[in-house]
Structures are given as structure tokens and as C-alpha cells.
Image (cartoon, rainbow, N blue to C red):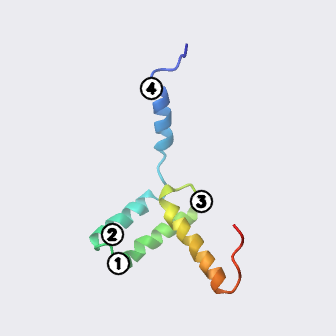
Amino acid sequence: MSTAKPGSWLRKSSLNMSKKDPCQKQACEIQKCLQANNYLESKCETVLQEMRKCCARYSQGRSVCCSGFEREERERQKFKVTSEGIPPPPQ
């Protein structure tokens, strides 16, 4: 018979999920800016840049909010390499 209290597994999993995303604040600022500016990214370049800086501070996968920015950076690097005439590394 188990000695664990009923529902204790739920509390443990909630603790893991409650770790705050380090770039969540910047992600929320982007959403607010886009909503206030009819979703014109050009009006939100400052907050987008802040998000990129935040994502650069943390290792890949640490921030769920950064997943799109990490993909954007990989694409940018791939384009930079191919535009310089150097073939991209094999994946």
C-alpha cells in the first residue's frame, strides 16, 4: 500500500510546470504591443528586439516563449551562410 498522500503527484507536477519562463514578460509585452498597433510588427520592433536579447541569454529549450525566435535565428543563419556562397552544414 502506498504511503503517499492522495493528490501528491499532482502537486509535484504542478511545481515543475510553475517554473516561470525567463522570457515570459517580454512575450507578453510583444502581445500587448501588437494588439495596440493593429498587429503591425514594424511598430513593435523595440519589444521584439528585447525578446531576442532575452532569448539569446538563455540556452535553447529553456524558454518555451523563445521557440519561434530560435527558429527565426536558425533560418537567418542558414540564409546568411547560403547568401555568402558557403553551403549550409548537413543536418
Image quadrant in which the N terminus is located: top right
Q: Amino acid at mark 3?
A: Gln
| First of labels 2, 4 by sequence position | 4
Front residue of 70/53: it is 70
The answer to which image quadrant residue 81 occupies is bottom right
Residue located at (72% from left, 70% from top): 90
| First of labels 3, 4 by sequence position | 4
| Residue tagged 1 | 43
| Residue tagged 4 | 7
Q: Are marks 2 and 1 in contact (CB under 8 Å)?
A: yes
Pointer 4: residues within 10 angstroms few (<14), some, or many (20+)?
few
Provide the secondary structure element on which disc 2 rests: helix
Q: Amino acid at mark 4?
A: Gly
Q: Amino acid at mark 1?
A: Lys
| First of labels 1, 4 by sequence position | 4
Front residue of 26/74: it is 74
Provide the secondary structure element on which disc 1 rests: helix
